[in-house]
Amino acid sequence: MISRRTLAAAAFAFGISALALAAPATAQTKWNLPGAYPSDNPHTENLVAFSKDVEAATSGKLIITIHPGASLFKAPEIKRAVQSGQAQMGEVLLSIHENEDPLFGIDVVPFLATSFADSMKLYKASKPAVEKKLAAQGLQLLFMVPWAPQGVYAKKELNTIEDMKGLKWRSYNVGTARLGELLGMQSVTIQAAELPQALATGVVNSFMSSGGTGYDSKVWESLTHFYDVQAWIPKDATFVNKAAFEALDKPTQEAILKAAATAEARGWKAWEDKTNWYLDQLKAKGLKILQPTPALTAGFKKAGETLTADWLKKAGTDGQAIVDSYKKM
Ligand code: PCA
C-alpha cells in the first residue's frame, strides 16, 4: 500500500523536477575546466580571464571553474576526462598526445617554427587538421596558446652535444623523450606539476622547456645553466566536450566562441611579452642564461633531423602537406 507520506514525497519530487525542467532558460550551468599548469602561469591566468568573459557575456548563466596545477586530473588525463564528459572543458599541452596522432606533435618538430610569427603560421596551416582530429574524438578545439621557445636546463656547462650524455633528463612528450634517447641520456617523463619535486630530489638534472616552466619550478634552486636553443614552440590546447557544447543554447555557444577568440589573442601576446621577462628573472636568481655554442647547436640540429624524419614518416602525406603549406606562407 502506498502511504500518504510516499505520495506527498513523490508529489514534492515531481514538483522539483518539473521546476528544473521548466527552468533551463534562466538556470545556471556550472562547468569544470581542469588545467595542468600553476595559477600564476600565463596559461592559467588566461583561462581565468576566459572564464570571467564567459560569465559576463552569459550574465552568469555559465560558470566555468578553473582547476589549475593538475589538481583535478593529471596532465596526461585531462584530455580523456573531457572526452568522457568527466569534465566539460580542459587545457593541456597538445603534444603530450602525439602518441595518439602524429599531428598533435606538429608544433614540436624540431626547428620547424621557432619564432612566435612562424609558430602562428604553423598554427594556421595545421589548425583545420588538428580540429578535425579532435572532433573525431568528441572534442571541439576552442583555442591554442604557445609557450616560449624551448631551451635546455642543466647543472653544468654544455659545450658539445656529447656533454649531455648520461644526464638525468626530464621529458614531457614523445619528442623530448626521443631526444633523451638519441643523446644518450637517462630519460624520465615528468609533467610540469611534478617537476619541482623531481628537481629538488635530484631525480632529474636536466630538461628542455621554456623560461616559464623553469621559473614555475624554481629551477635556480637545483640547476645552474640555461641554453637558449629555441628548438620549438609547443602549444597548449583548450577544448570542450562537443556534446556538452552542442547542448548549450546558441547565445551561450556564441559567448564561448567569442571569449575563446579573445583568449587566444591575449595568450599569444602574454607569452611574447613574457618570454624575456622570464629569462631576466632566471638570471636575477643566479642562473647562467647562455647562447649555445656552434658545436652544441650543430648537435641539436643533427638530432633534430632524426626527429623530423621520424615524425614525417609517422605523419605521412597529410603531415607533409601541412609542412609544405606552412613553408609557403
Ligand atoms: N612548459 C611545459 C611544456 C612546455 C613548456 O614550456 C613543460 O615543461 O611541461
Image (spheres, rainbow, N blue to C red):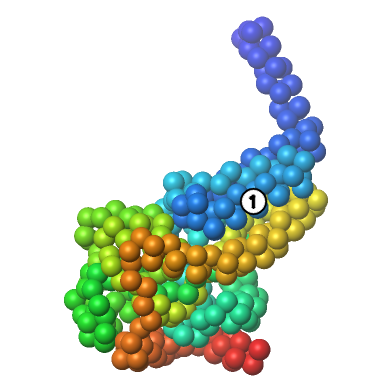
What secondary structure is marked by label 1? helix
Between 148 and 185, the one lying in front of the other is 148
* Quarter of the image where one finds residue 139: bottom right
Spot occupied by residue 126 in the image (x, y as percentages of width and height)? 60, 79
Between 150 and 318, the one lying in front of the other is 150
Q: Is residue 246 visible?
A: no
Give the total number of marks visible in the rendering.
1
Q: Residue at x 71, y 49 (%)?
A: 54
Q: Residue furthest top?
A: 4
Q: Is mark 1 within 8 Å of ligand 1?
A: no
Residue corresponding to mark 1: 49
For the C terminus, the image quarter is: bottom right
Spot occupied by residue 176 in the image (x, y as percentages of width and height)? 36, 74
Residue kind at label 1, given as amino acid type: Ala
Q: Residue at x 76, y 53 (%)?
A: 255
Spot occupied by residue 197 in the image (x, y as percentages of width and height)? 29, 53
Circle 1 Cα neighbour tier, 10 Å, few/some/many (<14 / 14–19 / ≥20):
some
